[in-house]
Amino acid sequence: MMDRTGSAGRNVTAIPAADLRRARVISLLIGVVIPLVLSGVVLGIILGWLPELPAPAVTHWGPTGADRFGPPATFAWAAVLLGFVLPAILTIATVAVVRDNWGGAARLLGGMALGLSGLSAVVNLAAVGTQRGLSDAKQAPDLWPYMLIGAALFLVLIAVGWLVQPHIRPAPAAPLQPVHVTSIARGERVAWLATATMSRVALILIALVMVLVVALTAVMAMRFTDRLWVPVVTLVLVGVALATAVSFRVRIDQDGLSVRSQVGFPRVHVPLDEIVAVRAVDCNPFGEFGGFGWRLGLDGRTGIVLRTGPAIEVERRDKRALVVTVDGADIAVAVLRAYLDRGSASSAAAEEAGS
């Protein structure tokens, strides 16, 4: 158990090389090899059925039934892209980015890759199978019963993928070199301020996503004027989500630790009397939290993690531990410890005076 200043803590030990290698191999097996085999089988079946499909075929089902049509070969491409390419990219990216920070997040993403492959297999086979022998694609039955089956299989395969992978506890975050701040006298005020932002690469990717969303919104607006509200609402939601997650203001003062998005929300405040321990660590958001932004880790911590690097880790009384990535985390922790020391000294003096 760490003391209030964080001087004692968990042993920082790396994951054994053999365990890490085994975890990576099994992840690649369930997220790349099995989807490759499964999508190959599905592709072969679909190619055999394509001559029996109407042209054009139904390629999309909406709330009112079939609403989009296209070439039957669409399903062959979907079987490859959704059944193999997407799961493979998810798995390979996880293995490459997580590196030696393997844990529950990487394990879950491997299971999701397997689940996506199974979902794709059910939906694509059902979409093609239900249209075999039809003279008019408009006669195709609704696909929602098969969607439910696919969703159930998706969840089952995620669980299977999770169970077959080894349970590896992630190595504790490496503590940074401690920095000491001269004690803060009673009545004296010291504040530490910083801005935590996503990395340049992440910001570029976000900008590309926004361009894509805007482009899709424009296409939807031109093609489906009666449903314009759908892409517009989607664009607004995506825009708000991104705006609230790319940059946060971090403040440490006599009131404790405060973190809030640049747009004002979300925000979190940790008073000094709620802090059990605090330390500066080196954080790998993808390995420890499964991604960037405001995250809930499988190890019970909450993360405001925008980039790989230094972070403030605060253990809170009766709440999840909080991790905030920010440059200068070592100095921030030193200031926070100085306030904690002042509070401890005041409490000790009060007890002595009372006795």
Image: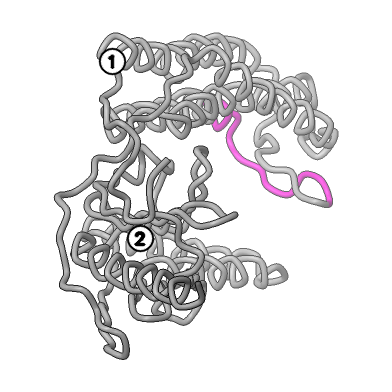
The amino acid type found where label 2 is placed reads Ile
Q: CA distance from mark 1 to mark 2?
A: 35 Å
Residue 16 circle label: 1
Which quadrant of the view contains residue 287? top left
Q: Is residue 131 left or right of residue 200?
A: right
The amino acid type found where label 1 is placed reads Pro
Q: Secondary structure at mark 2?
A: helix
Residue 201 magenta-highlighted = no
As drawn, 59 above or below 319: above
Q: Which residues are magenta?
A: 64-76
Q: Secondary structure at mark 1?
A: loop
Q: Nearer the viewer, residue 303 or 44?
A: 303
- Residue 335 in percent (x, y) is at 25, 70
Q: Nearer the viewer, residue 288 or 315?
A: 315
Residue 74 magenta-highlighted = yes
Name the residue tied to disc 2. Answer: 206
As drawn, 48 above or below 337: above
Q: Is residue 56 left or right of residue 272?
A: right
